[in-house]
Amino acid sequence: MADSIRKVKTSDLELKDRLVSIQRVTKVTKGGRTFSFSAIVVVGNEAGIVGHGLGKAGEVTTAIAKGIEDAKKNLIKVPVIKGTVPHEQEAKYGGARVFIKPASEGTGVKAGGAMRAVLESVGIKDVLAKSKGSSNPHNLVKATIAALLEMRDAYSVAGHRGIPVQRVFNG
C-alpha cells in the first residue's frame, strides 16, 4: 500500500474546498465551559486530485482555514475515467465501511453526505456509492479516500505488470 500512495504537489493547482462537517466541542473546566470548533474540509480540483483535512480552533472561520491548510498537505491523485471510477472498490476505516461502484453516464453522484463531498471534489460525475456501519463523517471521509487510493486504471496495471495495455483487457 505504501508504494501505491500518489502524492501531489500543491503548486499551480486550482483547488476548491468543501466543508464536510463542523462540530462544537465543549471543554468543562473549573471556571466554566470553553467552546471550540472542529471542521472537516475536503479540497479538490475536480480533475482527479483530492485531499482532506481537520482544523480545530476557537472560532469557526479559523477552524475552516486550518482544515483547508491541512487538506492541502494531504493531496492524492485518483484515476477518473469518463467521469466515473475504473472499478468497484470497498474500504474500511474505523467503524465506517464504504462501497464505490462505477455508473453509466448520466447517473450522477449517488452518494450521501461525507462521501458525496469527497467524490465531487475528485471530479467524479457518475458513481454509485454506499456507506455501511458508522456514519461518523471523520471516518467516512477517510474510508472514501482509502477506497479511492486503491483505484487503479488499466495503464497503471499494465505498467506495474510490465505488459502492453491491450493484454490487460484481453487477458
Image (tube, rainbow, N blue to C red):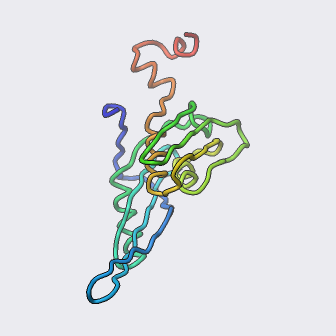
Nearest the viewer among 165 and 141 is 141
- Judge left or right: residue 120 versus residue 147: right
Q: Which residue is drawn at 49% across and 43% down?
A: 48
Closest to the observer, 25 or 52? 25
In the picture as drawn, the residue positioned furthest to the left comes out as: 30
Looking at the image, residue 72 sits to the left or right of residue 87; the answer is: left
Q: Would you place residue 82 above or below residue 33 in this image?
A: above
Which quadrant of the view contains residue 83?
A: top right
Count of all numbered marks drawn on residues in the image: 0
- Asked which quadrant contains residue 105, the reply is top right
Residue at position x 34%, y 74% from top?
57
Identify which residue is drawn at 69% across, 47% down: 108
In this view of the protein, which residue sits in the foreground, 10 or 120?
A: 120
Residue 123 coordinates in the image, percent (x, y): 56, 47
Quarter of the image with the N terminus in it: top left
Point out residue 100 in the picture as x, y percentages from the top left corner.
57, 39
Q: Kindly identify the residue that appears in the image at 38 percent across and 56 percent down.
A: 71
Quadrant where the image shows the C terminus: top right
Rendered location of residue 16, percent (x, y): 49, 59
**Residue furthest bottom in the image:** 31
Q: Residue furthest front?
A: 30
Q: Measured along the vertical axis of the image, is residue 36 above or below residue 107?
A: below
Residue 82: x percent and y percent?
A: 62, 36
Q: On the rendered structure, is 112 left or right of 149? A: right
Q: Which residue lies furthest to the right in this view?
A: 106
